[in-house]
Amino acid sequence: MSTALGDTPLLSMRLLGGFRVEHADVARAVSGWQRRSAKTLTKLLATCPEHALHREQILDILWPGADVDSALNSFGKALHAARHAFEPDLPRRTDSAYLRLTDAMLALNTDHVAIDADKFEQLAEDALRNQDVTSYESALAAYGGELLPEDRYADWCAERRSVLAELRVRLLVGLAEVLGNDGACNEAADQLRAALGQDPTREVAHRRLMHLYAEMGTPDQAVRQFQICADVLRRELDMAPQPETVSLYHKILGCRVPPQSAAADRDPSMADRNRAVVSQHLPAGTEATLVRPFVGRDRVIQHLCGQLARGTQRRGGMILLTGEAGIGKTRLLEEFAARAGRQGAAVLWSGRGAHAKQFACGLFAVALEGYAASLPAAERNELAGRYPALARFIPSLGTSGEPAPGDYHLDLIPAIVRLLTDLGRRQPVLLVLNDLHDADPFSLDLVRYLAHLAVQRPWLMVGAVREEEVEAGSELRRLIEATTRERLCLRIELRCLSRRDCDQMVRGLLPGARAGDELLARIYQRSRGNPLFAGELVRQLSERGDPALAAGDQDESWRAAAQVPARVRALAAMRLAAMDETLRRVLVLAAASGAAEISLGALRTGTAALEPPVSDAALLDALDQALQMGVLEEGSSGFAFRHPLFRSAVYESLSRHRRDQLHAALTRGGRDVTQLAVSPAG
């Protein structure tokens, strides 16, 4: 006896975002599951592409360790429970309209069961074929979330989950392409960021987002996106970016991807242009942006441009930028590289130090690969023929992936020198060496050699280093001291912005908001003029979309942004992780005091009460390290964190029981320096 098609209610089965079955006509959930195995059996059939499996397959998947009789018994009970969950009044020995067992094949009857994953898959295929906004949006709307998240670690649904997740990423990238072609740059960027949120290694999405940022007039965002791309590829896949990505990166550095004003005019989200992080509560008609203005470095950039223009007339061939984390060394290098490109210089950029330290001469490998990848194929072939040693070293010049000989570095140095010399005959050469503190020893030897040669050649090497990370006696320390002593290197220390420059930067970040003097003063007091810290405070203020900012309520605005920004917390955590244990313990103790300054006596009291205690000699050594690294500074009556935000970040990272332990240590012997610890100063 069978149920007629026209009399069978339709079941709606949801797999995306969590399992749920309901009667479609009355929107009533199926809830009478007597066995968990009945649900699992139903899910298994629903995730199979054909929605049918042989009984033996089901037994192997769901009861792999059971003997045949036991597995068959479990299968029968699960099937019976599933049928009666769908049709509680189904008479005995009556076929189910939803689950059919025929010749040992169990099938889910899709004539009567609508599965959301199937619908999404069909809509996705239609959208990828039609390539129009409506189709893409319809398909994405049908994606309710991860397939069966409650069964995330079950092997039987892993493949289908991956297929559907991949489809969603393809839809997001495809929709971004269509939107970008239509001029809706911000909407396109939103789709790409969503795609990267699901698959951070999708290089095509990184590349398209870089291009969009450049078209939107925010090359700094594009450069940052390249760095994110390179970092995640190295970390997750142990791979470098593809030549197309590196080529685009250097085009952006050389200002060869012009902003698309027409696209911006068509973009309906004008308030979101340039940085995509804007408060919706700002006054109507304003065009707010969080692109950090280039302020306070005019003299430095003019000096750098002048040194590049002097060619062989300058006294030294290398300039070293130093300064604390967040001071703006990379931002300055980006600005200088862009201006040098506009002046007609050949710019070779080493990228982040994390890529440069992976292998010998990695600093130059990244720079040369970026330069070569940006050239047309004919010019790359010419370079490969002229400099065979580079062809074995630079992927973009290689032809067959043949291994380099073990002593290929002996040929590499003269090949690099010849390339730079040939380039210098046609145009000035700028070699940017970012994050020198992460360079390998071979690269440092080559830097010193090139610094001698650059005195008589139209080359300029500009490097950046955080001196607090340069250990005494290290190869880099010896390089800096030797080249400075020999007048081959000019050192420029970047300092925090002045109050006036910091105010200018903040106003530039919030052009439509009423950033009054009180708010500006508090941001400067809390950031001490560090551009990264000030920028992150403003970003946090804007991302909250606080109406008080637009209304000019400075007290309310400041309270909305008083917490330590996430990026500053991450920076503080990274710096702490790189310190030795004793120094970390001393710093967290100082942060727990909550005072603007903590005396040496209070630190002695607290460190002696810790478990295990810190000796007086170890405390003094740790304080010397902290002063040398620029984390602490000497105050009028003790020691203070150089940046209040850093102190607050350290304090906020502590659990409550750890804070209590530190407070107890600081109050030992009746001395109480913790009265401000609940709400740290600054």
Image: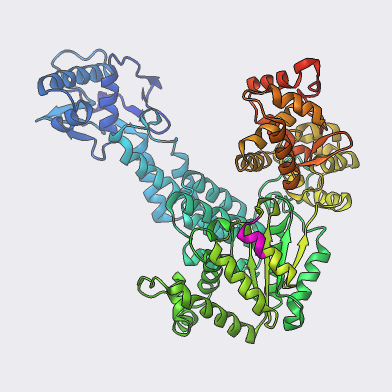
Residue 511 visible within the image: no
Magenta stretch, residue numbers: 473-479
Which quadrant, please, contains the N terminus? top left
Where residue 209 sits in the image (x, y, percent)? 56, 56
Where residue 105 sits in the image (x, y, percent)? 14, 32
Quadrant in the picture for residue 259: bottom right
Horizontal side of 259 relative to 232 (left or right) equals right
Where residue 260 sits in the image (x, y, percent)? 65, 64
Q: Is residue 475 magenta?
A: yes
Horizontal side of 206 relative to 632 (left or right) equals left
Which quadrant, please, contains the C terminus? top right
Q: Nearer the viewer, residue 97 or 449?
A: 449
Q: Is residue 355 magenta?
A: no
Q: Which residue: 44% across, 57% down?
A: 239
Number of numbered markers:
0
Q: Nearer the viewer, residue 565 or 404?
A: 404
Where residue 162 sits in the image (x, y, percent)? 36, 42
Horizontal side of 372 relative to 471 (left or right) equals left
Horizontal side of 653 relative to 509 (left or right) equals left
Q: Nearer the viewer, residue 455 or 430?
A: 455
**Which is the main secondary structure of the residues drawn in magenta?**
helix
